[in-house]
Amino acid sequence: QVQVVESGGGLVQAGGSLRLSCAVSGLTFSSYRMAWFRQAPGKEREFVAGIHRSGSRTDYADALKGRVTISRDNAENTVYLEMNSLKPEDTAVYYCAAGNLFPMTTRNTDYWGQGTQVTVSS
């Protein structure tokens, strides 16, 4: 069975950093585009960052561009999200997703993780 498992979330002070990890199993990892989404309470799930199958291309939500970096290690079946200069408005559940359509959206992804909570205190 396909498993998508996020980790690395937690409580961090504003201005701090976190590195989220997403371990994937049960599929050919290098054949999938990967992305991170986030969802705050009462809000729609939104795109954060995406990465091409080879890792050669990335794209980011405008609100986070310059503060986050997505990367992948195909040998380890893992995708990462490095977040810096965190703000209270970054507080959300962060989800890892795998898919094959571009751009990836909340509706065209194939697999989702359960999410990891990121809370940024002021």
Image (cartoon, grey):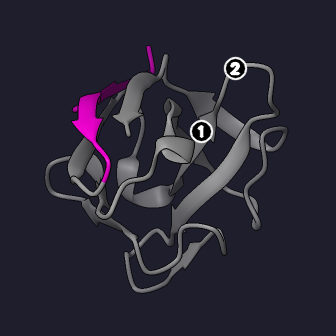
Among the 4 quarters of the image, the one containing residue 117: top left
Q: Number of marks in the image?
A: 2
User: Which residue is pictured at 44% across the width and 13% down the height?
Assistant: 1
Does the magenta segment cover residue 10?
yes
Q: Amino acid at mark 1?
A: Arg
Q: Which residues are magenta?
A: 1-14
State the CA–CA distance, disc 2 to disc 1: 10 Å
> Against 40, is 74 above or below?
below
Q: Of helix, strand and loop, which one carries label 2?
A: loop
User: Closest to the observer: 106 or 68?
Assistant: 68
Q: In the visual, does 29 lie left or right of 43?
A: left
Q: Amino acid at mark 2?
A: Pro
User: Which residue is pictured at 32% across the width and 64% down the height?
Assistant: 85
Report x, y in % for residue 47.
Answer: 67, 53
- Residue annotated with mark 1: 38
- Residue annotated with mark 2: 41
User: Which residue is pictured at 38% across the width and 40% down the height?
Assistant: 122
Report x, y in % for residue 8.
Answer: 22, 32
Report x, y in % for residue 86.
Answer: 37, 54
Q: In the visual, does 103 lie left or right of 63?
A: right
Q: In the visual, does 24 lie left or right of 114?
A: left
User: Closest to the observer: 21 or 117?
Assistant: 117
User: Closest to the observer: 77 or 63?
Assistant: 63
